[in-house]
Amino acid sequence: MAGVTWRRITLGVAVVYFLVPLAIAVWFTVYNESQGFSLGAYGRIVSAPGFGESLLKSLLLGAAVIVLVLLLALPALLAVRLGAPGLRPVLETITTLPLIVPPITYVVGIANALRGGTDALAATPFWQTLISIQDEDFPVVLVLAYVMLALPFAYRSLDTGLRAIDVRTLVEAARNLGASWPYVLFRVILPNLRSAVASAGFLSLALVMGEYTIAALMGYRTFPVWIVTISGNDGQLSVALSVLSLGLIWLLLLTLSGAGRKAK
Amino acid sequence: MSALVKNRRRGGGAGWLAAAPLLAVTLIAFGIPVAVLVIGAFSVEDGGLGFDNLSATMREPYIGSLWSSVKLSGVVAVLGAILGAFLAQAVLTSRSGLLREAVLTASGVLSNFGGVPLAFIWIATLGNSGVVTAALGLGAGALYNFWGLALVYLYFSVPLMVLVIAPALDGLKPQWREAAQNSGASTWQFWRMVGIPVLGPSLLGGGVLLFGGAFAAYATAAAMVGASVPLVTLQIADALTGNVLIGYENVALALSLDMIVIALLVMAVYLPLQKRSSRWLA
């Protein structure tokens, strides 16, 4: 009996704490005293200047980050299992680094490195490279930073996925039948890893769609940065955008976990 | 024998080759910025190296903001770990598959929800003109202080703890509990002598993750409290965006180094613990 009571209290407190702010936020966006019920705040999001542009930029960044994370992490993870176990501690260390270096300190380092690099390389052809990776429309430097931040999560979910399949047998069988390495990676390993890849993708995309610190301090107008600049003094709009970004994370999670589950 | 050794060596070489792109990108995208940061933190005005910047961060106002960040993260880690573990246990023992699924999905979403949108939602609820503030007649500033910030940080920390601790709670075998009951142990004795020791590493590991999350958080605090709660992340951002006196950029680098050292010390607790817990819960 006591067991039932503490469970009810715990769940009750959790429901109040987690759902009340959400309910209030939704109510706040659709109702105000002068106009009554209206979905106007959500309409204003779409018509706000820069909405499509910044959303598209963040989605592009997200796609690039997912592809790059998979291309970098998968071969390394396969190598650990296929004959280079000495790599494991190195990979564990690399994928722990972003947990130790908070984004705000990371961006301080990046900004200083870019400033110093641009000064030092001003007379060389590399200067052009440094400038072009800071391109406003598609900042490669941001992609690289997000890849580093996404690696710990992607690495762990891919590692868990690989643990469930017999990598060595699959690879040896495919190689003996004459498959090339890219074929092994894309047609043999990846299809067996669909749900791990989906969750790695979700975590990477959620990170890119929510990361504010690095983008804002480097002056890039990604979706999360746009949300803050456009909110200004329009309280209803800012809360509507918050509800929208929460909905976006939820949608991503549903889509990607659905994609992962279908494979089973 | 020699063929085997050769084969192994070749496999190793190919393995490192497969990991080469990852290592190269890490070296460039992570190694260079961190190296620049460390060198900058030790650079003094006359162009040499020294501890001037680091010792400046050990004085006011910087030391106060470091301490306040550590305190906030500690409070969030301890409260978040306890509340998250209770919530996870309540959900997992309810024997309702639907509730379990719903809570784990919601935890996945909320643990990824942060930044400025999180601040906006809480400002609408408990801000100076927030709905709950008005309904309960709370005064202005109820949210814009240390405990308000902790309350908001728990909104993503508790769900993260639920996700971290759920597999460990699932790993507590019912047989252990039955064995304890058959030997006459009370519920409290079971938890004190079996449950908590087995869960301990996961609980502490989760706490470390929560500490790291709260310690690194910047956007939520910037949108909510501005300067009313001094935090080290806010101070670094101020220095970076030129909100401070010229010549203090290197102090920002030194503060960043302080943050990394603190995170490193906390992480050093986590890694060995993770290994210990995986042994029991395999």
Image (cartoon, coloured by chain):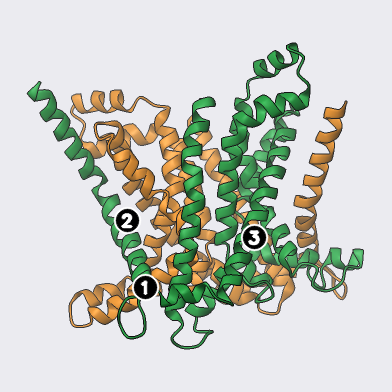
Chain colours: A orange, B green
Quadrant showing the N terminus of chain A:
top right
Where is residue A225? Give x, y as percent.
54, 71
Residue B238 is situated, as x and y percent measured from the top left of the image, at 54, 78
Task: Report, in whole angstroms, how far the alpha carbon at label 3 lies from the one at label 1.
Answer: 26 Å
CB contact under 8 Å: marks 3 and 1 = no
Identify the residue under disc 2. B26
Query: Quarter-wise, where is residue B54 in the image?
Result: bottom left
Q: Amino acid at mark 1?
A: Phe
Of all chains, the one bearing label 1 is B
Q: Secondary structure at mark 2?
A: helix
Label 3, on which residue?
A: B71
Q: CA distance from mark 2 to mark 1?
A: 23 Å
- Residue B70 percent coordinates (x, y): 60, 60
* Label annotation for residue B42: 1
* B121 relative to B9, above or below: below
Nearer mark to the viewer, of 2 and 1: 1
Disc 2 residue type (three-letter): Thr
Nearest the viewer among B266 and A66 is B266
- Look at the image and tell me whether residue A63 can be seen: no
**Numbered disc in front, either 2 or 3:** 3
Q: Is residue A69 above or below residue A124?
A: above
Residue B56 visible, this angle = yes
